[in-house]
Amino acid sequence: MTEPSILIAGAGPAGLAMARALRARDIGFAIVERAPEAAASGAGLFLPANAVRALHALGVREGGHPVSRMRVLDHRGRRLVDMPFAEIWGDTGECRAIRRADLHAALGEGVPVTRGVADPRGYPLVIAADGIHSAFRSGPPPRPVGLVAWRFLATGLPEPHGWTAWQGRDRTFLAVALGGGHAYCYADCTGRPAGDWRQLFAGFADPVPALVAHGEHAHVADIEEVGPAFSDDPGIVLIGDAAHAFSPNMAQGAALAFEDALVLADLIAAGRVGDFRSRRAARVAWVRDQTRRRDRARHLPVPVRNTVLRWAGQRMIRSQFRLLRDRP
């Protein structure tokens, strides 16, 4: 590998993916993480097919649990949408769910990370992979979208390969199978409630109350949006959440970060870093626009929302992911 001429700032999924992509092309880099030790906040991730495809291209082929079917129910458990993911993704590949710690370990295998704050001076190129509150991004700060979310791991999910969302009036609960009855769980609501957030889901259909009981120490955060953002400094490139972060209803955060890494590594190898914006802008903007539409749709009056999902949900969902079936 050549001597490091590139600094990767941030050793989360985006930064580690970038390191793997550069290493595969024999391009020298240094990667630094300001956190004193590895953290795996957020509990788990659902990886749609384009994320799994990108992981394979990064050399990560094992790990996680296959998820083959999606169901959207109302809060009483009545079916709104029920379809296999293959109808959404075609031959793009399978979807998977994974514990965040396992994903971090798989991406970080063999990647030497320096912990502390690095001086970016002396590096011709800095790749900012330091998250939604990036120190390298100028412009407006992240914008709250009005949702607060909880993420945690639980046991007691009866569906071995399912992705199931229960939608209430102003709140949603999602459980994704991790195998063996284990689940990655995500819950959100509009505004931050007073008291124990788990009471928001007390009236939901089984198995939601039993799963929610595992969320005492859930990772909680306000959902924020940023980007698409690109640096005007030719010596700095933003990737992952530093460049784009949206409502998670399409589960595209990790997928876009992995794609960023693959596209940017190819451009660096070809000496065309300046083309990164044009290569990524339209795809990232598509995800932003679709996530906004999905958020607006879920906050329609409940009878309207449920009717739309029952009669047109499958067609709408296929359309929302259509562009992402193509390689970036």
Image (spheres, rainbow, N blue to C red):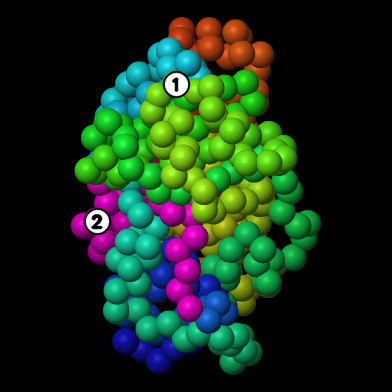
> Does the magenta portion include 204?
no
Q: Is residue 49 visible?
A: no
10 Å crowding of disc 2: few (<14), some (14-19), many (20+): few
Of tags 1 and 2, the one toward the viewer is 1
Name the residue: 67% across, 71% down. 136
Q: Where does the magenta region start and end?
A: 37-65
Which one is nearer the viewer's eye here, 129 or 196? 196
- Compare residues 14 and 230 and report the one nearer the observer: 14
- Answer with left or right where residue 67 lies relative to residue 165: left
Q: Residue 103: image x %, image y %?
A: 35, 60
Q: CA distance from mark 1 to mark 2?
A: 31 Å
Point out residue 11 in the picture as x, y percentages from the top left corner.
Answer: 47, 72
Name the residue located 59 percent from the left edge and 92 percent from the top edge. Answer: 122
In the image, residue 163 sits, relative to residue 253, either above or below, namely above
In the rendered image, which residue does mark 1 sit on?
A: 205
Tag 1: residue type?
Answer: Ala
Image vertical order of residue 231 relative to residue 110, above or below: above
Which amino acid does the dot numbered 2 rest on?
Gly
The picture quadrant where one finds residue 326 is top left
- Quick one: 45 or 187, which is closer to the camera? 187
Q: Looking at the image, is 78 positioned above or below residue 132?
A: above
Which residue does the numbered mark 2 point to in the structure image? 63
Asked if residue 90 lies left or right of residue 219, the reply is: left
Q: Position of residue 90 (x, y in %)?
A: 28, 31
Image x and y of residue 287, in percent: 54, 40
Q: For the residue labelled by badge 2, is the local secondary structure a helix, a strand or a loop?
A: loop
Q: Is residue 176 left or right of residue 276?
A: left
Asked which secondary structure carries label 1, the reply is loop
- Residue at 71% from the left image edge and 54% from the top image edge: 142
Is residue 159 visible to us here?
Answer: yes
